[in-house]
Image (cartoon, rainbow, N blue to C red):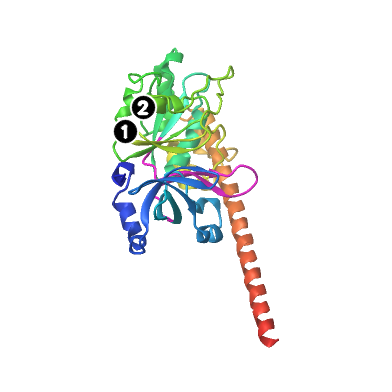
């Protein structure tokens, strides 16, 4: 049975980027989930299972070049089978990335082609404005629009003060408070859900992302576990999945992220900390670190109560992380280029030797 791709977010942007693949006879499809390099897709032909082509495997230099949940891809279905081969990943309108776990300096795309990102934070002991700041920096860098969702109003004695605290760091980002236990409690979210629009839910384990999705869907699709005594929560979502909602929108649930490793540039950081950046323009030194220099306008603003010291420290910490990441990335690029030149040189020398022999 065919599928109307506009329901899954197909628009003029993707259509324009698909034209060259259409001439080759490929079909467009969207990644709904992935499991050990097997991809599940929505296409005009219906739901398909697919693998990437050998060309993608051999030419991709990093994980970010492989398909991610939410990606639009060019596929070649196999006649008479619900199987296909992915030949290309279309340009992304947006993507949310993080550094891969461990010491490797590689980008991991968590989800792609997202219109809105719900930053879900609990109003219980999981409440963490500093974590919200980090998410905002990443989302501003992703190309998507953020919405801050404060869940579990039923567990908070002073919801308004929490909202006010978050609004001080949110700037123009909408801040809404909900209780995801029933449809009435998530009503403020409904105005953001539109047909063909994709929403990603991000937040640490235990903040209620799966419960929000279950309430939006109207039944318990996602497993929900009780929060541990330390309020950190158990990981209830283990794989990212694109889910079609009854009202026509789409959501991508993501595994809980307690400590997100920075993968954004200074532009995203500056948007998330616009008040700190604006204040820093008045520092005596253009390269002021906002820690020990004389004439620091940021430190003066802290003393006068115009800026929160914890927020400034969060900005300084992320700026250092981004600077260090850029250095490591540049080093990795140099090593990669050096390796390519060595391989090319060896190949050329081998060809010359064979010619003379």
Regarding mark 2 in the picture, which secondary structure is present there?
helix
Q: Residue at x 32, y 48 (%)?
A: 10
Furthest residue in direction front, as rendered? 80
Q: Give the residue number, with chain letter if any, for mark 2.
A: 216
In this rendering, the answer to whether 228 lies above or below 314 is above
Residue 256 on the magenta segment: no
Earlier sequence position, callout 2 versus callout 1: 1
Regarding mark 1 in the picture, which secondary structure is present there?
loop
Q: Which mark is residue 193?
A: 1
Residue 103 on the magenta segment: yes
Q: Residue at x 34, y 33 (%)?
A: 245
Looking at the image, residue 1 sits to the left or right of residue 97; the answer is left
Q: CA distance from mark 2 to mark 1?
A: 10 Å
Q: Which residues are magenta?
A: 88-117
Q: Give the camera-side residue of 326 and 66.
A: 66
Furthest residue in direction bottom, as rendered? 356
Residue 312: x and y, percent? 52, 34
Quick one: quadrant of the N terminus? top left
Q: Give the camera-side residue of 245 and 158.
A: 245
Residue 314: x and y, percent? 54, 34
Q: Residue at x 54, y 29 (%)?
A: 310
Look at the image and tell me whether residue 278 can be seen.
no
Q: Residues within 10 Å of mark 1 (few under 14, many from 20)?
A: some
Would you say the residues marked 2 and 1 are in contact, meaning their CB atoms lie under 8 Å apart? Answer: yes
Q: Residue at x 36, y 28 (%)?
A: 217
Q: Residues within 10 Å of mark 2 (few under 14, many from 20)?
A: many
Please identify the quarter of the rendering in which residue 85 is found: bottom left
């Amino acid at each position: 049975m065919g599928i109307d791709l506009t329901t899954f977010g197909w628009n003029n942007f993707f259509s324009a980027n698909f034209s060259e693949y259409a001439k080759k006879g490929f079909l467009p499809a969207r990644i709904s989930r992935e499991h050990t390099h097997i991809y599940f897709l929505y296409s005009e032909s219906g739901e398909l299972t697919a693998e990437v082509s050998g060309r993608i495997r051999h030419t991709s230099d990093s994980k970010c070049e492989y398909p991610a949940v939410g990606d639009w891809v060019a596929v070649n279905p196999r006649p008479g089978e619900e199987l296909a081969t992915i030949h290309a990943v279309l340009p992304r309108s947006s993507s949310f990335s993080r550094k891969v776990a461990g010491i490797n300096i590689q980008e991991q795309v968590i989800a792609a082609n997202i219109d809105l990102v719900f930053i879900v934070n609990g109003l219980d002991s999981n409440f963490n404005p500093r974590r919200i700041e980090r998410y905002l920096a990443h989302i501003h860098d992703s190309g998507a629009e953020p919405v801050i969702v404060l869940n579990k109003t039923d567990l908070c004695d002073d919801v308004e003060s929490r909202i006010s605290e978050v609004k001080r760091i949110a700037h123009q980002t909408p801040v809404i408070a909900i209780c995801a236990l029933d449809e009435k409690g998530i009503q403020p979210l409904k105005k953001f859900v539109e047909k063909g629009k994709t929403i990603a839910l991000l937040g640490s384990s235990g903040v209620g992302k799966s419960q929000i999705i279950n309430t939006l869907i109207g039944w318990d699709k996602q497993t929900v576990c009780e929060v541990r005594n330390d309020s950190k929560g158990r990981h209830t979502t283990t794989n990212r999945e694109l889910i079609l909602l009854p009202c026509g929108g789409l959501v991508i649930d993501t595994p809980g992220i307690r400590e997100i490793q920075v993968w954004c540039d200074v532009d995203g950081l500056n948007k998330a900390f616009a008040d700190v950046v604006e204040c820093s323009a008045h520092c005596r030194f253009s390269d002021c670190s906002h820690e020990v220099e004389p004439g620091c306008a940021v430190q003066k603003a802290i003393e006068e109560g115009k800026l929160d010291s914890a927020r400034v420290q969060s900005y300084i910490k992320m700026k250092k992380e981004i600077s260090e990441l850029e250095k490591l990335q540049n080093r990795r690029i140099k090593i990669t280029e050096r390796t390519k030149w060595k391989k090319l040189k060896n190949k050329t020398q081998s060809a010359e030797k064979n010619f003379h022999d």
